[in-house]
Amino acid sequence: MAAFTYSNNTGDAIVDLATISQTINVYGSTAPLTGVSVAILGLTHTFSGDLDMLLVAPNGTDNLVFWSDAGSVNDLNGVYIIQDGSTGLTELGMVPAGAYGPGAFSLGDPLETDATFGSSTGALNFAQTDGSATFASSFSGDPTGNWTIYIHDDTAADSGAFTGLQVIVGNAATTAQIDGTAVRTRSS
């Protein structure tokens, strides 16, 4: 079993009340998935509870809302790795840079839908506490293709940015092609 990291180092601003998406092309291995995680590089934001993040697999339907309204009292600054097996994101309090398990919290907001992100999965899967989904329960099969990460800022007055995104794919393969392409889109 091996893990391969696929990156999109385009970076982007996270502006109030808007959604951005970026794709990461995973290719070079068709071995079945054994794990998926996400890294948000150079993430800054002046209110962590504003953010909602969704990962969608190449098939367009497998998905996980892996970060929703996590934390509430701090600025974000650093690298955030979201993976199964780590201590989950917290609903209230500090979210310093580091590794966390996925977490989705309503905090009085309505649950996100495909319309929130501009995606078309058919139905979103939520991590704890709004749901019970994990990366392992949400994704399986061939990892090849464009993975999309959506980042939504759901409240006015705070903003941020990130310098890159990564999808880390675990599978039974021992080799994979290591270069690729990426695109980004923004909707307001």
Image (tube, rainbow, N blue to C red):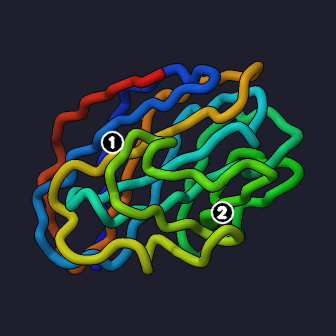
Q: Toward the viewer: 77 or 13?
A: 13
Dot 2 alpha-carbon crowd within 10 angstroms: few under 14, some 14 to 19, many 20 or more: many
Query: Does residue 2 sit above or below 10 in this rendering?
Result: below
The kind of residue tagged 1 is Ser
The kind of residue tagged 2 is Gly
Q: Toward the viewer: 116 or 97?
A: 116
Q: CA distance from mark 1 to mark 2?
A: 22 Å
Q: Toward the viewer: 34 or 157?
A: 157
Pointer 1: what residue?
7
Q: Which mark is residue 121?
A: none
Considering the numbered disc 2 on the image, is that residue within a helix, a strand or a loop?
A: strand
Dot 1 alpha-carbon crowd within 10 angstroms: few under 14, some 14 to 19, many 20 or more: many
Q: Which residue occupies 35% across, 55% down?
A: 56
Considering the numbered disc 1 on the image, is that residue within a helix, a strand or a loop?
A: strand
In this rendering, position of residue 30 left or right of residue 35: left
Q: Position of residue 107 (x, y in %)?
A: 80, 52
Q: Which residue occupies 67% across, 68% down?
A: 130
Query: Does residue 11 sit above or below 80 in this rendering?
Result: above
Q: Which residue occupies 32% across, 71% down?
A: 170
Q: Position of residue 184 (x, y in %)?
A: 32, 28
Q: Quadrant of residue 58?
A: bottom left
Pointer 2: what residue?
103
Query: Does residue 138 sit above or below 148 in this rendering?
Result: below
Q: Which residue occupies 77% across, 33% down?
A: 47
